[in-house]
Image (cartoon, rainbow, N blue to C red):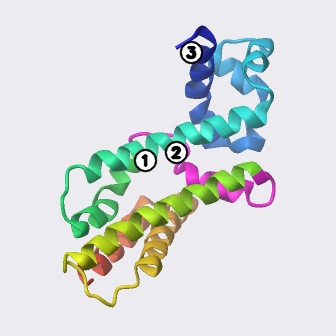
Amino acid sequence: MSKAERTRAFIIERTAPIFNKKGFAGTSLNDITAATGLTKGSIYGNFANKDEVALAVFDYNLNKLNTAVAIEFAKHTTAKEKLLVYAENYEKIFNLPFTEGGCPILNTAIEADDTHPDLKKRAAAAVLSWKNKLVQIIEEGVANKEFKTDVNAAELALSMIAMIEGGIMIAKLLGNANHFVVIMQSMKKMIQTL
């Protein structure tokens, strides 16, 4: 890795929690320089603008989240067990890489919806990729006779994503993590009845 690549990676890693917590609009260049100890010239010598930093940070945060999920998936073999990873371990996955700010997909989707088309595209692609992964797991479960044959994989995948992201939003908004736990218990029951 070249010095320039190391510097870019350093900036991304150090500013990832700030962007995740404050969002694109709330993160200033002063926040970036304070977190990195670099000058504005160093930041802009490695990134064209704040937009480029934000996109790289989103990719970094998404990769951390996906890696944490993949580690949990690797511990299981059946489709049902993999789906239950979300209901039983998502809070652990969610808290490990993102101690501050919450889910990067949710945060970015909400903030960028009407304000930042490029970030919105990244968040949308993340949700669609997540949906596709879930659909694949559900279809494997149907093929392996773990689930009923009439399960609508796309509908179930979107419902699970909505329950997870909605649960996070409600828990954060109301300041009560138990709301998320209750929603995950409902999702667990839903998965158990497939």
Q: What element carries label 2?
A: helix
Alpha carbon separation for disc pair 2 and 3: 19 Å
Q: What stretch of residues is rendered in magenta?
A: 96-117
Separation of residues labelled 3 and 1 (CA atoms): 22 Å
> Which residue is label 1 attached to?
66
Nearer to me, 88 or 153: 153
Residue 153 in view here:
yes
In the displayed structure, 4 sits above or below 76; it is above
Q: Residue type at mark 2?
A: Leu
At label 1, counting other C-alpha atoms closer than 10 Å, the crowd grade (few under 14, some 14-19, many 20 or more) is some
Whether residues under marks 3 and 1 lie with C-beta atoms below 8 angstroms apart, the answer is no
* Residue sitting nearer the eye, 84 or 118: 118
**Residue 162 x/y as whole percent:** 51, 71
Residue 6 marker: 3
Q: Residue at x 48, y 41 (%)?
A: 63
| Magenta stretch contains residue 114 | yes
Q: Is residue 115 above or below residue 142?
A: above
Q: Closer to the N terminus: mark 2 or mark 3?
A: 3
Q: Residue at x 55, y 27 (%)?
A: 13
Q: Name the residue under label 2.
A: 62
Instruction: Decide if residue 35 is on the left or right side of residue 132.
Output: right
Q: In this view, does 162 lie to the left or right of 193?
A: right
Q: Horizontal placement of 141 versus 7: left or right?
A: left
Tell which circle, 3 or 1, labels the residue nearer the N-terminal end. Answer: 3
* Amino acid type, label 1: Asn
- Look at the numbered discs 1 and 2 and tell me whether their residues touch, using CB distance below 8 Å: yes
Question: Which quadrant holds residue 160?
Answer: bottom left
Q: Where is residue 33 in the image (x, y as percent from the top left)?
A: 71, 19
